[in-house]
Structure formats: structure tokens, C-alpha cells
Image (spheres, helix red, strand yellow):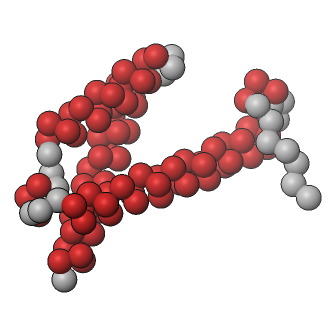
Amino acid sequence: MTAPILAATDCTTMAEVRAGVDAVDRELVALLARRFAYMDAAARIKPTRNAVRDEGRKAQVIGNARDAAGAAGLPGAVIADMWERLVEGSIAYELAAFDRSRG
């Protein structure tokens, strides 16, 4: 039986902290799977491969993440850097999905 995951403020050992981080990481992967399902949908819906990359939308998504980070008390620049990589990875995934769907 595994110990319950504690709130960060209740952790008193590094084992508890690491268990919490690992649990959050599993949640993040599940959320990314949901996000990538939308990339599959976008690849199916977009009419051309050139439509996959949209720099305006990319800037909007990163800006939204930066703003949400600030509202949550997180460093906006750090979150924006993370979202840059997330969006670029999503674009690469969507391009591959587009190519697979068009055979």
C-alpha cells in the first residue's frame, strides 16, 4: 500500500516531496495526452500542411500561459520558456499527425 500524497506544505521529508512531484508529473502527462488529442484533431481539420504552423496563435498561447502564470504567482518568463518548447513540440507532433492522416 502506498502512502497518501501530502500537500506540499505538509511535507517534512524529501521522500514526501518527491512522491508529490512524481504524482504531479503523472497528472501533467495525462493533461499532455489530452492536449495532444487536440493536435490530432487540428491535423485532421486543417486543410493544408502549411496551416499547421501559426505564429500568431503560438504567440497567443505563450502569452496566455505567461499571464496565467503571473496570476498564479509563478514566474511568467519561466512558464513562457516552458510553453515555447511545449508549443514547438506540439507543432512537430501535429505535422507528423497531418502527414500520417494524408498517407
Residue located 32% across and 63% down the image: 40
Most foreground residue, 4 or 46: 46
The percent position of residue 14, horizontal first and vertical second, equals 77, 38
Residue located 42% across and 24% down the image: 68
Residue located 27% across and 69% down the image: 97
Seen in the image, is 44 located left or right of residue 55?
right
Residue located 14% across and 45% down the image: 54
**Given the current orientation, which residue lies at the most extreme right position?**
1
| Quarter-of-image position of residue 58 | top left
The percent position of residue 46, horizontal first and vertical second, equals 17, 59
Q: Is residue 95 above or below residue 101?
A: above
| Quadrant of the image containing the C terminus | bottom left
Seen in the image, is 42 located left or right of residue 32?
left
Most foreground residue, 8 or 41: 41
| Quarter-of-image position of residue 4 | top right
| Quarter-of-image position of residue 52 | bottom left
Q: Is residue 65 above or below residue 83?
A: above
The percent position of residue 83, horizontal first and vertical second, equals 35, 39
Residue 13 visible? The answer is yes
| Quadrant of the image containing the N terminus | bottom right
Most foreground residue, 99 or 81: 99
The percent position of residue 79, horizontal first and vertical second, equals 40, 31
**Given the current orientation, which residue lies at the most extreme bottom position?**
103
